[in-house]
Image (spheres, rainbow, N blue to C red):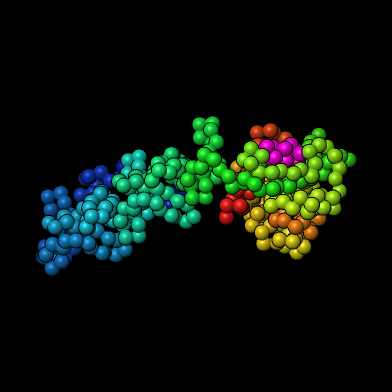
Amino acid sequence: MTIYVEGIGMLKKRIFVFMLFSFLFVAAGPLHQAEANDSGWKLENGSWYYYDNNSKVTGWLHEGEDWYYLNSSGRMLTGWYLVDEKWYYSDWNGRMLTGWIQDNDTWYYLDANGVMRTGWLLEGNKWYYLDASGKMQTGWYHLNDKWYFLDASGVMQTRWIKDNGIDYYLDKNGVWNPNPVYLEGRIIVIDPGHGGHDSGAIAAGAYEKNINLDVALKLRDYLTKYNATVHMTRSTDEFISLTDRVAFSNRIEPDAYISIHVNSASGSTAIGIETYHNSKKGVLPQESKELAAAIQSELLKATGANDRKVKDANFAVTRGNNTPAVLVEMGFISNDAERANLINSSYQDKIAKGIYNGLSVFFDR
């Protein structure tokens, strides 16, 4: 059986399955059968040929929207075949295929001209690797003394991945780096929102100030593990004014400022993560926007949360802050399911890792 699709998103794309038994193929053929002394398709001894003025056509044949290949004897080819040292694939009707195809349990890619691709393939914004035989690779792959990791769909991975319980770091080119140093020497200010008598949002006994601090401490541990220098506006349950937070950051002169918060809504249906920058009164608006975009993207990858996008707002902690400064809203405490995640230590780890990855992307851009 051969399955071929319009894209590699296997579960989301339309899948066309051609299961043609030989008697159906013989009965139907690629098109109409030629009459005697006519042009067109003709079945001879179980194989299809194409006649033009009673002469067999060989080589490539373009009929309608489809391409067919007929060998030196004029026989229409199906399956894999080699032409001018290039591999092509035609279905049981003889039509040359393009795009992704699955032959048995292996995926291959045929370009717009039908040629089987090998090596690196960029489709959309995703990279795939096809070995010398055209087979799409998954899992770890060793190439030119470098290790890459491609997921079950064949997509090359970047940044942090977990494989068999072990964390690995892949740089922006997908290369495994056993000793990542993108944050080495970087100075980061982490600002857990609220604190002390300012609890922030409250729902079902959960306090925003506590969640903010829990995640901030986990993020601190990630950053220091990879040789960044971290300064916390607070590391305990204490109240710090907004102006003091900004003044603290400006005294430190960090490479980035991350303010961590939990969202809330009057209803219970709002969910998702959003990250803010300040284009109006931020000191470094473009850099802050890029930082917000990197963190938002990596948070979504790490958590699978709903994307409430990168947003622009004139928050006090991002106003007058002399560094790329963002405010992260990690989710809605007012939503039961999201609140359960926000107070869960494993989910907090994912958030911290997502922010860390976002910083790595930002400084590696």
Q: Is residue 304 visible?
A: no
- Tell which residue pokes out farthest to the bottom in this image: 53
Residue 84: % across, % down: 22, 57
Quarter of the image that includes the N terminus = top left
Nearer-the-camera pick, 305 or 136:
136
Classified by dominant secondary structure, the portion drawn in magenta counts as: helix
Residue at 31% x, 57% y is 114
Residue 362: % across, % down: 61, 53
Residue at 81% x, 49% y is 248
- Tell which residue pokes out farthest to the top in this image: 165
Q: Is residue 131 left or right of residue 29?
A: right
Answer whether residue 54 is magenta in the image.
no
Q: Is residue 29 left or right of residue 311?
A: left
Nearer-the-camera pick, 224 or 365:
224
Q: Is residue 133 left or right of residue 197?
A: left
Residue 217: % across, % down: 72, 37
**Residue 215 sits in quarter:** top right
Q: Which portion, as a residue range, is magenta? A: 212-222
Residue at 43% x, 44% y is 146
Residue 228: % across, % down: 66, 44
Q: Is residue 349 visible?
A: yes
Quarter of the image that includes the C terminus = bottom right
**Residue 302 sits in quarter:** top right
Nearer-the-camera pick, 205 or 164:
164
- Tell which residue pokes out farthest to the front in this image: 185
Nearer-the-camera pick, 363 or 41:
363
